[in-house]
């Protein structure tokens, strides 16, 4: 059994920023990075909207540098996945296979994952034409045609945002009517850059892959009523079918909203359990940006440090 003052579950911009700040506070945090060390940015290519990088930065490079910076001040990271937690007693207990950790304070930064179509080709071209974040990647699609898949508010928001850059946005939906709110539907219907492809499913993302250089060229789609196949010439595909917070580990232990996002108290990162804090996309269903996640990681670290000090643990 290993005891730490602070254990951070999950990495990504929120977790590694929390690690940096708690390490600089001499709390010697342990980061249990989870199944995707570095978070979603590790599968992202160019990042051009993170402050401090005028020429952009690769997602994996940014996350590796953030990890190194936290470790420089004494944070320790382990590439392991937490199987179970026990917040019913103090110190808190966390279990990783046969290893048990205890912690005076826990910071949860397990993030949220975009819901995907589940196609092999979708994964192959992720970051090379396929994206799950218009705010992150829309800039790269200036003057070209793109598609958005989905029928809810997420898809309409993504499509509307993309019209700032793309020459045309096609919304692909399996049904004949959208699930989005009436206001969102009207906004899309009145946008001259948006078209709809109804009763249609995406069968394959098609592109080139020469000497490791990938580029999406079009989609192979199927009409679900007629079963007819066709090609849709678009250079980008944005997945707009929602996100799933990675909170299964904490079901029944921490207050969550109806969609599974952890509820935090007011403008803080406190959860309903004293000594447990949450930051990043696991508690943010609105912004979902690396910079906002890093900001809440800083907040969680400061909240945890002050809470520990109030308990005489420094």
Image (tube, grey):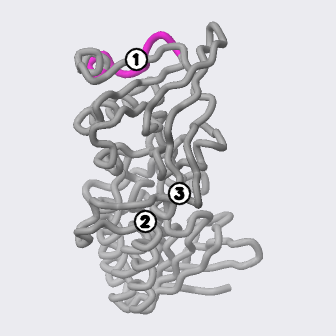
Residue 280 at x, y = what percent?
39, 59
Q: Residues within 10 Å of mark 3 (few under 14, many from 20)?
A: few
Q: Is residue 189 above or below residue 121?
A: above
Q: Point out the residue furthest to the right here.
A: 98
Residue nearest the viewer, comparing 253 with 101: 101
Q: Which residue is mark 2?
A: 59
Q: How many numbered marks appear?
A: 3
Magenta segment includes 182: yes
Q: Is residue 295 above or below residue 25?
A: above
Q: Residue at x 57, y 20 (%)?
A: 230
Q: Point out the residue furthest to the top here.
A: 226
Q: Residue at x 37, y 81 (%)?
A: 20
Circle on res. 196: 1
| Prevailing secondary structure of the magenta residues | loop
Task: State if disc 1 and disc 3 touch (CB < 8 Å).
Answer: no
Q: Residues within 10 Å of mark 2 (few under 14, many from 20)?
A: some
User: Disc 3 and disc 1: Cα gap in Å?
Assistant: 31 Å
Along the polypeptide, which appears first: circle 3 or circle 1?
Answer: 1
Judged from the image, the secondary structure of the residue bearing numbered disc 2 is helix
Residue 38 at x, y = what percent?
50, 68
């Amino acid at each position: 059994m290993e005891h730490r003052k602070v254990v951070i579950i999950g990495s990504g911009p929120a977790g590694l920023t929390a690690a940096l700040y708690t390490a600089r506070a001499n709390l010697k945090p342990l980061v249990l990075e989870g199944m995707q060390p570095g978070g979603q940015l590790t599968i992202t290519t160019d990042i051009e909207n993170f402050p401090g990088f005028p020429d952009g930065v690769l997602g994996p490079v940014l996350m590796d540098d953030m990890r190194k910076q936290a470790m420089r001040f004494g944070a320790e990271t382990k590439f392991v996945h937490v199987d179970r937690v026990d917040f019913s007693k103090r110190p808190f207990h966390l279990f990783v296979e046969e290893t048990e950790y205890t912690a005076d304070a826990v910071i949860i930064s397990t993030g949220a994952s975009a819901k995907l179509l589940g196609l092999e080709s979708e994964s192959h071209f992720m970051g090379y034409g396929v994206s799950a974040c218009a705010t992150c990647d829309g800039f790269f699609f200036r003057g070209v045609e793109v598609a958005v898949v989905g029928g809810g508010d997420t898809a309409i928001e993504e499509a509307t945002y993309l019209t700032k850059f793309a020459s045309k946005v096609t919304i692909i939906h399996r049904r004949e009517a959208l699930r989005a709110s009436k206001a969102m539907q009207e906004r899309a219907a009145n946008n001259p850059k948006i078209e709809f492809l109804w009763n249609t499913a995406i069968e394959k993302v098609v592109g080139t892959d020469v000497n490791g250089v990938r580029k999406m060229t079009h989609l192979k789609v199927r009409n679900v009523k007629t079963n007819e196949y066709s090609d849709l010439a678009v250079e980008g595909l944005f997945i707009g079918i929602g996100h799933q917070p990675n909170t299964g580990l904490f079901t029944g232990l921490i207050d969550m909203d109806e969609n599974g996002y952890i509820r935090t108290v007011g403008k803080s990162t406190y959860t309903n359990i004293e000594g447990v804090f949450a930051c990043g996309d696991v508690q943010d269903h609105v912004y979902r940006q690396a910079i906002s996640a890093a900001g809440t990681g800083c907040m969680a670290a400061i909240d945890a440090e002050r809470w520990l000090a109030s308990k005489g643990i420094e």
